[in-house]
Image: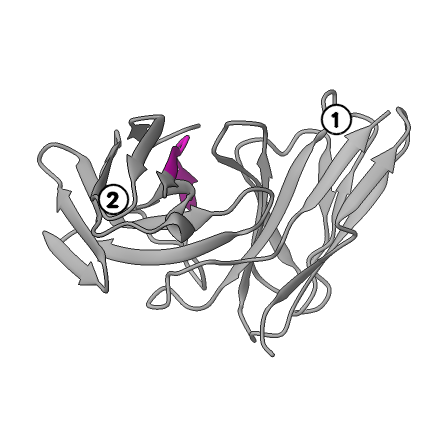
C-alpha cells in the first residue's frame, strides 16, 4: 500500500535532549512537509522540502532541523533549543503543482518530561 | 501565520441534518482545500477548489468559494455519526513554488459532532 509512515507514534523525551522523528513515503512525491499541531489549534508549517537535498524554513523553524538525503525520507530533529516542544507532529507529502493535495502521515505525539 | 479562520469553532448537530462550516482568509490564493482530522490522527484531504472556480461537489460535500469576500464554505449534507471530526481549510498562495508542492496555510478548524 502506498502512503506515509511516521514513527514512533508516541515519544517521550527529557528536557535538554534532541530527538528525531521519522517520516517515510512511498508515493514517489517530490515535496514533503513537517507541521506542528497544538491542542485545539490548526497546523503550523515547520519546514518543507520540494526536492532532494533542498529544504526551506516554514513559519516556526526555530529549534528544529531537517534533512532530505533521499526522496522517500524527511526526518525532523527537535533540538534542545526548541522552548516548547510538546506537541503533535505531522508529516505530509505532495506531488507536482497540478497535484496539490497533501497526504498526511498518522502523526507523532511528543511529550517533554 | 494562520491564514484561515473557520467559523464556527464547534458545531453539534443531529444525524441526518446538514452541517455548514465557513472559512475566511486574508491574502490572494491559488486554491483552497478542505481537510478532515479524526481525533489524534493525520489529516485526510476532502476537496480542492481553485481560485477561478465558484462551487464544487464531491459526494455529500459541497464547497463554495467567493474570492471577492475571501471566504469559502463547506456543506456536508445528510450528516452521519462517522462525520464527527475536525475540519480545516487550507489555502495555497498565489505565488507558485518553483519545483514541486504547495505551501499551505491552515486555519484553526471547526470541531463537528454528529449525534445519533
Instruction: Residue B53: tell me if it is visible.
Output: no
Give how far across and how far down residue A87 sits, in percent: 67, 32
Instruction: Residue A5: tell me if it is visible.
Output: yes
Does A4 sit left or right of B64 as displayed?
Answer: right
Q: Is residue A108 above or below residue A69?
A: above
Q: CA distance from mark 2 to mark 1?
A: 31 Å
Q: Which mark is residue B29?
A: 2
Q: Residue at 57%, 35% (x, y): give it.
A: A37
Q: Is residue B109 magenta?
A: yes
Q: Which residues are magenta?
A: B104-113
Q: Residue at 16%, 58% (x, y): give it.
A: B56
Nearest the camera: A17 or B44?
A: B44
Q: Which mark is residue A82?
A: 1
The answer to the question of whether label 2 and label 1 lie on touching residues, with beta carbons closer than 8 A, is no
Q: Which image quarter is the N terminus of chain B in?
A: top left
Q: Is residue B22 magenta?
A: no
Q: Pointer 2: residues within 10 angstroms few (<14), some, or many (20+)?
A: some
Q: Main secondary structure of the magenta part?
A: strand
Q: Which mark is residue A19?
A: none
Amino acid at each position: 500500500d502506498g502512503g506515509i509512515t511516521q514513527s514512533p507514534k508516541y515519544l517521550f523525551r527529557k528536557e535538554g535532549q534532541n530527538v528525531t522523528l521519522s517520516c517515510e513515503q512511498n508515493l514517489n512525491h517530490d515535496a514533503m512537509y513537517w507541521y506542528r499541531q497544538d491542542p485545539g489549534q490548526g497546523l503550523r508549517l515547520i519546514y518543507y522540502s520540494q526536492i532532494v537535498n533542498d529544504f526551506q524554513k516554514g513559519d516556526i523553524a526555530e529549534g528544529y532541523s531537517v534533512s532530505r538525503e533521499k526522496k522517500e525520507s524527511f526526518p525532523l530533529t527537535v533540538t534542545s533549543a526548541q522552548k516548547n516542544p510538546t506537541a503533535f507532529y505531522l508529516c505530509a507529502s505532495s506531488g507536482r503543482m497540478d497535484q496539490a493535495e497533501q497526504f498526511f502521515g498518522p502523526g507523532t505525539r511528543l511529550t517533554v518530561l | 501565520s494562520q491564514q484561515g479562520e473557520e467559523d464556527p469553532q464547534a458545531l453539534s448537530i443531529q444525524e441526518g441534518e446538514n452541517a455548514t462550516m465557513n472559512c475566511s482568509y486574508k491574502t490572494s490564493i491559488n486554491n483552497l482545500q478542505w481537510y478532515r482530522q479524526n481525533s489524534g490522527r493525520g489529516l485526510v484531504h476532502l476537496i480542492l477548489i481553485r481560485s477561478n472556480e465558484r462551487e464544487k461537489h464531491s459526494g455529500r460535500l459541497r464547497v463554495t468559494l467567493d474570492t471577492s469576500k475571501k471566504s469559502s464554505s463547506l456543506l456536508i449534507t445528510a450528516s452521519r455519526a462517522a462525520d464527527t471530526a475536525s475540519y480545516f481549510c487550507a489555502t495555497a498562495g498565489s505565488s507558485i513554488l518553483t519545483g514541486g508542492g504547495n505551501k499551505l496555510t491552515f486555519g484553526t478548524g471547526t470541531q463537528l459532532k454528529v449525534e445519533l
